Image: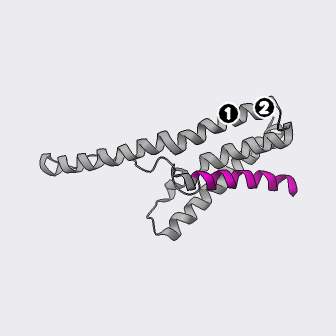
Amino acid sequence: MLFELISNKPLVNSIIAFITSQILKSIYFYFSGTKKQIHEFFGTGGMPSSHSATVSALSTTIGITSGWGSVSFAISCVFSSIVIYDAATLRRAAGNNAKKINEITTKLTESLGPQTIKLKTDIGHTVPEVVAGIALGTLLSVLSFMF
């Protein structure tokens, strides 16, 4: 069973794309001067999008192994499109809403009492973050078949 899991190229490539994007995200945060904690390695948001990298690696690997016209590739593309759309729109909007809620609660707590817990605001992705994730996932999958 373990051998079947580690020889499952779409699964392995997706995991590699996720880990690589999270490492690159940590490096990006470090050099951009953004103060992040080590637990942010597993967080959402940031450059590149690990969601986009993971599902792009999955779709690319399935396309290469099963064929670009296969049902598996079609299912993977639909799944990937939903995940990428969600990361770039819905979760981004939720993060923007969280920023506004944090601003409102900060103003209220100045007059009413102690500070409340802040909502996480960097949960979505910008278009460049998504595009970088798609490029990373696709590139890593293609490279896995070359070496």
Q: Where's the C terminus, which quadrant?
A: bottom right
**Real-space CA distance between mark 2 and mark 1, rounded to the nearest whole angstrom:** 10 Å
Q: Quadrant of residue 139?
A: bottom right
Closest to the camera, between mark 2 and mark 1, is: 1
Q: Secondary structure at mark 1?
A: helix
In which quadrant will I find the N terminus? top right
- Residue toward you, 101 or 78: 78
Q: Residue 74 appears in which quarter of the rendering?
A: top right
What is the x, y in percent for residue 23?
A: 61, 59
Q: Secondary structure at mark 2?
A: helix
> Is the residue under label 1 in contact with that under label 2 (CB below 8 Å)?
no
Q: Residue at x 60, y 50 (%)?
A: 50
Q: Residue furthest left?
A: 111
Q: Is residue 45 magenta?
A: no
* Number of numbered tags placed on the structure image: 2
- Left or right of 102? Residue 38 is right
Instruction: Tell me the kind of residue under disc 2.
Output: Ser
Does residue 49 appear left or right of residue 4 in this picture?
Answer: left
Q: How is the protein colored in the picture?
A: one colour
Q: Which residues are magenta?
A: 130-147
Please name the residue that numbered disc 2 is placed on: 72
Q: Is residue 60 visible?
A: yes
Residue 137 on image: x %, y %: 70, 51
Mark carried by residue 78: 1
> Depth check: 134 or 58 in front?
134
Residue 82 coordinates in the image, percent (x, y): 60, 35
Near mark 2 (Cα within 10 A), the count class, few <14, some 14-19 or many ≥20, is: some
Residue at 30% x, 44% y is: 101
Query: For the residue marked with disc 1, what is the amino acid?
Result: Val
Q: Earlier in the sequence, mark 2 or mark 1?
A: 2
| Rendered view: 2 above or below 131 | above
Determine the residue positioned at 73% across, 42% down.
58
